[in-house]
Image (tube, rainbow, N blue to C red):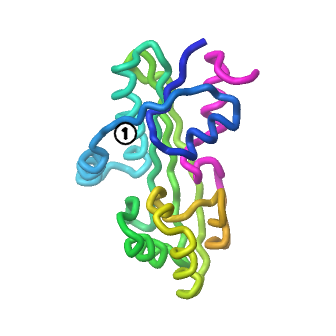
Amino acid sequence: MSTLILASASQIRSQLLSANHIPHQIEPARVDEASLKAALIAEETKPRDIADALAEMKARKISERFPEALVLGSDQILVSGNRLFDKAESLEDAADTLRTLRNTSHTLLSAAVIYEGAKPVWRHIGQAQLVMRDFSDAFLSSYITRHGDALLATVGCYKLEEDGPTLFSRVQGDYFSVLGLPLLEVLAFLRTRGIGET
């Protein structure tokens, strides 16, 4: 059976794999995401291709160190209108993000790329569309206070697996892609490689 390495420090991605009986080790890829993302945006690359390229960069970097393993790289892009959002760097930024997304729709693209022997062997991009409700400023302030710096770990400044649903009026598409990993597709591929229960 192959070894699976998660090229990410994301707790939720690791938790999703563990909860579904997928043994794995964690080796976060140290990559300059901001520079690659900026270059791709400057080239007018489509958001789904940006997500795919970022996920691939992480998988490739770790696969070069562990060529005998399957390496899972992943990345998530949030798009609203023509704007791509980055993770907030402060709670003030998080509040700005949520105010911008309030009463509008946005798309989450969650890319996963698996490498083996420093070459890609599988890839998938999950997608979800979310409509944020027109919540009050008082609700926003309470939400920011309640979650604090935990909001800085996600591109949308919310966690649907916790009380994130209180922000929304509609969620369509792949739930697991909202969490940051197209889990069902990942599990299906891993089973073909003898990882996970069949």
Magenta range is 173-198
x and y, in percent, of residue 86 in the image: 38, 59
- The quarter of the image holding the C terminus is top right
Q: Residue at x 37, y 68 (%)?
A: 90
Relative to residue 47, is residue 56 depicted above or below?
above
Q: Relative to residue 63, is residue 107 drawn left or right?
A: right
Label 1: few (<14), some or many (≥20) within 10 Å?
A: many
Q: Residue at x 44, y 53 (%)?
A: 77
Task: Depth check: give the residue in front, 30 or 108.
Answer: 30
Q: Residue at x 28, y 50 (%)?
A: 34
Residue projecting furthest to the right: 198
x and y, in percent, of residue 7 in the image: 44, 33
x and y, in percent, of residue 67 in the image: 40, 15
- The quarter of the image holding the N terminus is top right
Q: Relative to residue 30, is residue 15 drawn left or right?
A: right
Residue 191 inside the magenta-drawn segment: yes
x and y, in percent, of residue 71 in the image: 47, 25
Q: Amino acid at mark 1?
A: Ala
Determine which quarter of the picture holds residue 160.
bottom right
Label 1, secondary structure: give it: helix
Q: How many marks?
A: 1
Residue 37 inside the magenta-drawn segment: no
Q: Residue at x 39, y 64 (%)?
A: 88
Determine which quarter of the picture holds residue 135.
bottom right
> Which residue is denoted by mark 1 in the rendering?
53
Q: Relative to residue 164, is residue 76 drawn left or right?
A: left
